[in-house]
Amino acid sequence: MTTTDIQQEIERTRARLGETVDDLAAKADVKARAQATASEMKARAAALPGRVWQSQAMQRRWPAAVAAGALVAGAAVLIWRRRRA
């Protein structure tokens, strides 16, 4: 191996080491990773506004639907009892 080959190998090793250090620093930057995750989640949430609102509307309407069904069933029972009496 010549001196030039050794110097080129040293430069390649330094470049790889620099990339490795940058990758490790990015993984260690918890705040930046959390911000990236939060922005990704915001983008995903913004992409589905109709589905979210429909789900929330159904959650609010469900108790009212059950109460209305119980009221109708109760009225039917009362009417049925009066007719039998």
Image: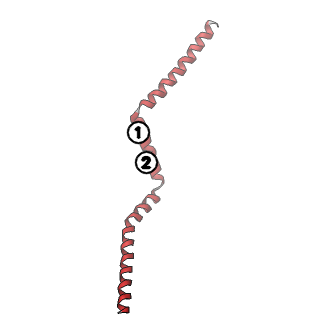
Residue 7 image offset from top left, x and y in percent: 58, 11
- 63 in relation to 33, above or below: below
Residue that carries the numbered disc 2 in the rendered image: 42
Q: Nearer the viewer, residue 39 or 70?
A: 70
Count the labels in the image.
Answer: 2
In the rendered view, tell whether residue 82 sits above or below residue 16. below
Q: What is the spatial separation of the Cα atoms under label 1 and label 2, in whole angstroms? A: 12 Å
Q: Residue at x 42, y 43 (%)?
A: 38
Indicate the secondary structure of the residue bearing disc 2.
helix
Mark drawn on residue 34: 1
Q: Farthest right residue?
A: 1
Which label lies toward us, 1 or 2?
1
Dividing the picture into quarters, in which one does residue 60 lie? bottom left
Residue appearing at x 37%, y 92% in the figure: 84
**Residue visible at 59% across and 14% down in the picture:** 9
- Tell me if label 1 and label 2 are in contact, CB under 8 Å: no
Quarter in which the N terminus is drawn: top right
1 or 2: tag closer to the N-terminus? 1
- Could you tell me residue 15's position as x and y percent? 54, 20
Give the side of residue 54 with respect to residue 71, left or right.
right
30 or 72, which lies in front? 72
Residue 59 x, y percent position in the rendering: 39, 63
Left or right: 36 as drawn, with respect to 4: left
Q: Which quadrant would residue 27 be assigned to in this image?
A: top left
Q: Amino acid at mark 2?
A: Lys
Name the amino acid, label 1.
Answer: Ala
Q: Secondary structure at mark 1?
A: helix
- Residue drawn at x 36%, y 80% is 74
Q: Is residue 18 above or below residue 58?
A: above
